[in-house]
């Protein structure tokens, strides 16, 4: 794929993300959320600090933490559309943000929100889902420790935007 086309796709993705962020802010003003407590959407000038869980050795930055009646709700914004249900990787990412919110702020969120271009999905943060998250993290760490890992895709655009691209022996051209 031509470098100009790739940069054009990246620019379009950024524009879409900004539009989603603006839509979330508009909907927030129309909704009953009290405030945005954390905003790592890229709109503000100073990036937020990552949330951290020392027990799971996990860090991450949700796009937003909204406060409703004193309860923090993590929100992850996706630039894609969704057909039926959340993608597994998006689900586990949101569950990780629920866990990180609880460990960082000392408050367990009852749910998190995955905001796709065409709709928002409310994901309950249950004990069972938290256990599934812990299992997935343990399995990933085990695979890495045992050398059972590798590129999990054939998408050049995904590879191009990967944070490990500079060190990856399996990167796509």
Image (spheres, helix red, strand yellow):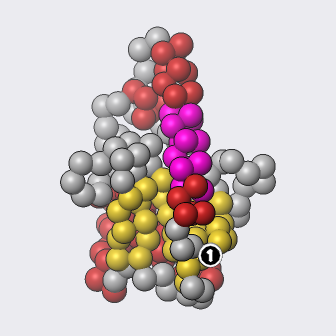
Q: What element does badge 1 sit on?
A: loop
Front one among 66 and 2: 66
Going 58% across and 55% down the picture, which residue do you hit? 26
Q: Which residue is mark 1?
A: 34
* Quadrant, the C terminus: top left
Provide the residue span drawn in magenta.
13-25
Relative to 154, is 34 above or below?
below
- For residue 19, side relative to residue 111 (left or right): right
- For residue 59, side relative to residue 48 (left or right): left
Query: Is any part of residue 155 visible from this angle?
Result: yes
Across and down, in percent, residue 156 comes to: 39, 27
Q: Residue furthest right?
A: 46
Across and down, in percent, residue 97 comes to: 50, 69
Residue 15 magenta = yes
Across and down, in percent, residue 16 comes to: 51, 37
Going 57% across and 85% down the picture, which residue do you hit? 69
């Amino acid at each position: 794929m031509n470098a100009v086309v790739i940069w054009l796709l990246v620019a379009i993705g950024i524009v879409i993300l900004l539009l989603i962020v603006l839509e979330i802010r508009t909907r927030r003003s129309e909704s009953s959320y009290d405030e945005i407590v954390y905003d790592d959407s890229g709109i503000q000038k100073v990036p937020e600090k990552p949330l951290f869980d020392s027990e799971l050795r996990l860090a991450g930055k949700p796009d937003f933490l909204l406060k409703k009646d004193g309860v923090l709700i993590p929100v992850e914004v996706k630039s894609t559309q969704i057909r039926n249900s959340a993608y597994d990787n998006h689900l586990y990412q949101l569950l990780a943000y629920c866990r990180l919110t609880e460990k960082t702020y000392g408050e367990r969120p009852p749910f998190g929100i995955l905001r796709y271009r065409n709709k928002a999905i409310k994901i309950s943060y249950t004990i069972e889902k938290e256990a599934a998250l812990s299992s997935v993290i343990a399995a990933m760490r085990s695979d890495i420790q045992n050398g059972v890992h590798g590129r999990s895709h054939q998408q050049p655009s995904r590879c191009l935007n990967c944070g490990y691209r500079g060190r990856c022996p399996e990167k796509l051209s």
